[in-house]
Image (cartoon, rainbow, N blue to C red):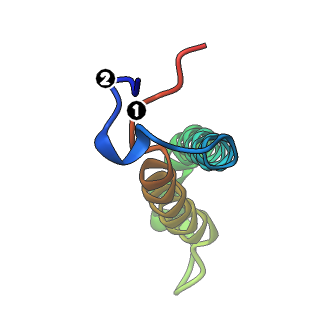
Amino acid sequence: MANPLLPPEERNLTPAQVEALDKRRDLGHTFLVIAGQFTVMATIVLLWVGQDLTYSPGWLHPMAFYLVIALALIGFFGLIGLVLRRGTPRID
């Protein structure tokens, strides 16, 4: 009998489909970890952005550009990670 706690689309999966689902969720978890690491890095870079914007001449603001790139990567990896991790978590 199928487990009634699982969503209907996951109740009657074959072993190969379960393995593919686990790989997808593991990749989603990896992307969330990468987003978390970029969040820590962006927090540290944020400490220098104010000084960079104040003292760098013209359009040369490398720390601000690094922060924008880090925020874009956080958004990308975070959203993709959340999409891949959707569904019922595996209980180990």
- The residue to which callout 1 is attached is 88
Query: Mark 1: which amino acid?
Result: Thr
Query: Mark 2: which amino acid?
Result: Leu
Q: Residue at x 51, y 41 (%)?
A: 43
Residue 30, image x, y percentages:
66, 43
Of label 2 and label 1, which has the lower sequence position?
2
Indicate whether 83 appears above or below 15: below
The C terminus, quarter of image: top right
Q: Residue at x 70, y 47 (%)?
A: 16
Asked if the residue under mark 1 is in contact with the one under mark 2, i.e. CB atoms within 8 Å, the reply is yes
Residue 44, image x, y percentages:
58, 40
SS at mark 2 in the image:
loop
Q: In front of the other: label 2 or label 1?
A: 2
Q: Residues within 10 Å of mark 1 (few under 14, many from 20)?
A: few
Q: Nearer the viewer, residue 32 or 41?
A: 32
Q: Nearer the viewer, residue 34 or 14?
A: 14
Left or right: where does residue 76 sit relative to residue 1? right
Q: Residue at x 43, y 57 (%)?
A: 79
Indicate whether 65 appears above or below 89: below
Quarter of the figure with residue 57: bottom right
- The residue to which callout 2 is attached is 5
Residue 83, image x, y percentages:
42, 55
SS at mark 1 in the image:
loop
Q: Number of callouts in the render?
A: 2
Q: Residues within 10 Å of mark 2 (few under 14, many from 20)?
A: few
Quarter of the figure with residue 70: bottom right
What numbered label is drawn on residue 36? none
Alpha-carbon span between mark 2 and mark 1: 9 Å
Q: Residue at x 53, y 25 (%)?
A: 90
Q: Nearer the viewer, residue 88 or 6?
A: 6
